[in-house]
Image: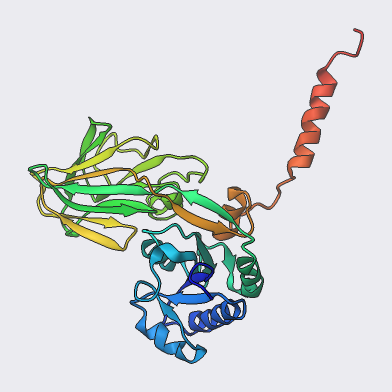
Amino acid sequence: MSEATQRDILVVAHAGRENTVTAARRVIADLTAAGARAVLPADEEGLVAALADLGSIAVLGADVPVDRIELAIVLGGDGTILRAAELVRDGTAPILGINMGHVGFLAEIEADVIDDAMRRVIDRDYQVEERMTLAVRVKDAAGTTIYDTWALNEATVEKASRERMMEVVIEVDGRPLSSFGCDGVVVSTPTGSTAYNFSAGGPVIWPTVEAIAVVPLSAHALFARPLVVGPEATVAIEVLARTDGTGILWCDGRRSHDLPPGARVVVGRAPQPVRLARLHPAPFTDRLVRKFQLPVAGWRGPVALATDAISTMDAGAPESGA
């Protein structure tokens, strides 16, 4: 098969979990049978070794550049999906998450429908949904950029020492908003609104609403409420020089950088989104109910509600010709 027609599918799985390795075998077997080539991450030597008996498996970077990846199939939970987002960041491949963990909020399907999912992947029968990401930059007290990264879920500025509080100033679009002592500040995308932001008491934001949430953590202040700003806003968090100790920046819980007193973390919308493959597009409300097992007993349904509304309108409306 020529390079132009070769279909390269990235498979990302946790090599230390037997169920994900078994699922990866099924996925790779289906891809191979359809004439596609399975590609594994370069740093997953354990997974490559565990699947060596399946034949020649390509390695990302060494054998296949990221811009040739058609799709990334992820077997795992949200952490594995975030890792896959890092792996395909320099390409355009969408990510299909198959939940092998607990909540798996970013995952599209559960493990019991892998075979059906693979048939649709092979037929390219899926939709692609784009999710906004954050560009994150750290500057030192002199204004020099010392760290540059990005986040799909959130960028979090946290205190580095449990026994100390950090003091920060929040800025939006170049204007100071408030200063306070706190344990940290979470800056979240709509995708991340159901992750750390949710646990910190921030708002759940529908993926169709492009916005950035800012949530202080355990703040000692009269005005330290969660904020929702526009998608083009720039949020800055300054670690005040009088802070007793250092802070730390975490992005998606995966990448970190130490923050000395006087550091400034600038967060805004990144130009490149993360693309998610969807097999069963459904209302976000349904996903919330399913993933969080929310109680909906007693719901009468939209048909009954609509009928009631129409009946009320009819009862109060004048008769024709009146």
Residue most toward the right? 321
Mark yes or no: residue 78 visible: no
Image spot of residue 206 (x, y percent): 51, 44
Which image quarter is the C terminus in?
A: top right
Among all residues in the image, which is located at the extreme top? 322
The correct choice, above or below, for 158 with respect to 211 in the image is below
246 horizontally vs 56: left or right: left
Count of labels in the image: 0
On the picture, is 299 further left or further right than 73?
A: right
- Is 268 placed above or below 20 here? above
Q: Is residue 80 visible?
A: yes
* Residue 26 in the image, given as x and y percentages of width and height: 58, 81
In this view, the residue in front, 243 or 187, is 187
For image coordinates 84% across by 22% down, the residue present is: 315
Q: Nearer the viewer, residue 272 or 228?
A: 272
**Residue 268 on image: x %, y %:** 31, 42
- Report the quarter where the N terminus lies: bottom right
Q: Residue furthest bottom?
A: 53
What color scheme is it?
rainbow
Which of 67/242 is in front?
67
Q: Does 285 sit left or right of 12 as displayed?
A: right
What percent of the width, then of the height, locates residue 300?
74, 45
Asked if residue 164 is positioned above or below residue 254 in the image, the reply reads above
The one of 63 and 320 positioned closer to us in this rendering: 63
For the point 19% across and 49% down, the residue is 138
254 displayed left or right of 3: left
